[in-house]
Image (cartoon, rainbow, N blue to C red):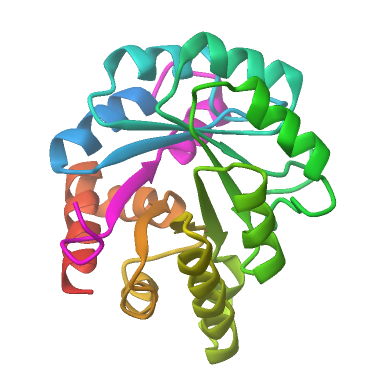
C-alpha cells in the first residue's frame, strides 16, 4: 500500500475495554471488537497496555496476538516490565508512549530528546520488534527518533484535533517534512475524527497510518463497530 492508495487505519480498542472495566464484567470484549474491525477492513489493531491496567489487560494482549490477522500495534511505556511483556508476546510493532497515572488519556508526546537514554535502551531491549515513538510534532523530536533507531514516529495530533487551527496543522506539516527528510515512517494519532482526519491526510503526503480509537468507538455506539470502521475507511479514501 502506498500513501496515495489510502492511509492505513489502525483501530485502538482501548475504549471498548474501558466500558468493560467500568462494571468489572467480561463484556464488551475488546478483542471481539478487534476481530470485527479487521473483518470490516481495518488495517491493524492498536492496544495500550498501561502500567495501571486501567483498561486493556495482559490477557487481552495475549488473545489479540493469537487472533489478529492484521498488524498488531502494542502501545506501552518504556519500562522493563513492558519490554518483557512485548518480547514475550511479539507484536508486529511497539509504540512507546509517555504515561502519567493521573492523566485521563495520553496528554502529549514522549520527549525523546530529554529521555534519549531510556528510549535507546528500550529500543535495544526490544530487539527485532520494530519500534515507533509517539512524539509531539517538533523537528528535534523527529530527528532524535531517527537517530535512536526508531522504525517510525507517530505524531501527536491532540492539539490539532482540539481546535483544528492553521497553526497546529502547520506544526504537523513541518514535522512531517522533517520525517520525509530523514527517512522515517510517519503515522499520526490522538483525537482524530472522521471529519478532521481528512485535511490532515491531504496535507501530509508521506503519512502512512492513523491510529483512531475514541471517536471511532463512540460512533460504533450508533452504527456498530463494522459501520464505524467503514465510515473511517471512506473518509480516508476521500482524503
Magenta region, residue range: 1-27
Q: How many marks?
A: 0
- Specify whether residue 198 is painted magenta: no
Q: Is residue 106 visible?
A: no
In the rendered image, residue 142, in percent from the top left (x then y), is placed at: 62, 61
Q: Quick check: 69 above or below 76?
A: above
- 213 vs 88, left or right, is left
Which image quadrant: the C terminus?
Answer: bottom left
- Specify whether residue 13 is painted magenta: yes
Q: Is residue 30 visible?
A: yes
- 132 vs 64, left or right, is right
Q: Quick check: 190 above or below 152?
A: below
Would you identify the image quadrant in which residue 200 lies?
Answer: bottom left
In the rendered image, residue 34, in percent from the top left (x then y), is placed at: 30, 31
User: In this orientation, which residue lies closer to the viewer: 48 or 203?
Assistant: 203
User: In this orientation, which residue lies closer to the viewer: 30 or 22?
Assistant: 30
Q: Residue at x 85, y 52 (%)?
A: 114
Q: Residue at x 64, y 13 (%)?
A: 84
In the rendered image, residue 160, in percent from the top left (x then y), is placed at: 55, 75
In the rendered image, residue 92, in percent from the top left (x then y), is placed at: 40, 27
User: In this orientation, which residue lies closer to the viewer: 220 or 59?
Assistant: 59
Would you identify the image quadrant in which residue 235 lies?
Answer: bottom left
Would you identify the image quadrant in which residue 234 lies?
Answer: bottom left
Q: Residue at x 49, y 78 (%)?
A: 173
Q: Residue at x 50, y 69 (%)?
A: 181
Amino acid at each position: 500500500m502506498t500513501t496515495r492508495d489510502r492511509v492505513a487505519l489502525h483501530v485502538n480498542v482501548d475504549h471498548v475495554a474501558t466500558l468493560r472495566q467500568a462494571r468489572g464484567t467480561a463484556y464488551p470484549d475488546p478483542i471481539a471488537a478487534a476481530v470485527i474491525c479487521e473483518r470490516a477492513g481495518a488495517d491493524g489493531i492498536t492496544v495500550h497496555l498501561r502500567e495501571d491496567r486501567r483498561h486493556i489487560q495482559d490477557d487481552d494482549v495475549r488473545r489479540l496476538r493469537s487472533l489478529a490477522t492484521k498488524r498488531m500495534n502494542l502501545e506501552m511505556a518504556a519500562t522493563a516490565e513492558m519490554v518483557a511483556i512485548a518480547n514475550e508476546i511479539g507484536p508486529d510493532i511497539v509504540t512507546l508512549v509517555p504515561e502519567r497515572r493521573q492523566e485521563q488519556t495520553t496528554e502529549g508526546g514522549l520527549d525523546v530528546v530529554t529521555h534519549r537514554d531510556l528510549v535507546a535502551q528500550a529500543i535495544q531491549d526490544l530487539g527485532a520488534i520494530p519500534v515507533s515513538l509517539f512524539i509531539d510534532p517538533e523537528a528535534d523530536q523527529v530527528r532524535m527518533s531517527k537517530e535512536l533507531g526508531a522504525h517510525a514516529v507517530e505524531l501527536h495530533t491532540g492539539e490539532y484535533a482540539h481546535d483544528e487551527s492553521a497553526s497546529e496543522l502547520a506544526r504537523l506539516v513541518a514535522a512531517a517534512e522533517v520525517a520525509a527528510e530523514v527517512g522515517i515512517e510517519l503515522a499520526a494519532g490522538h483525537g482524530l475524527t472522521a471529519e478532521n482526519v481528512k485535511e490532515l491526510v491531504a496535507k501530509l503526503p508521506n503519512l502512512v497510518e492513523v491510529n483512531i480509537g475514541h471517536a471511532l468507538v463512540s460512533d460504533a455506539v450508533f452504527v456498530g463497530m463494522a459501520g464505524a470502521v467503514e465510515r473511517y475507511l471512506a473518509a480516508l479514501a476521500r482524503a
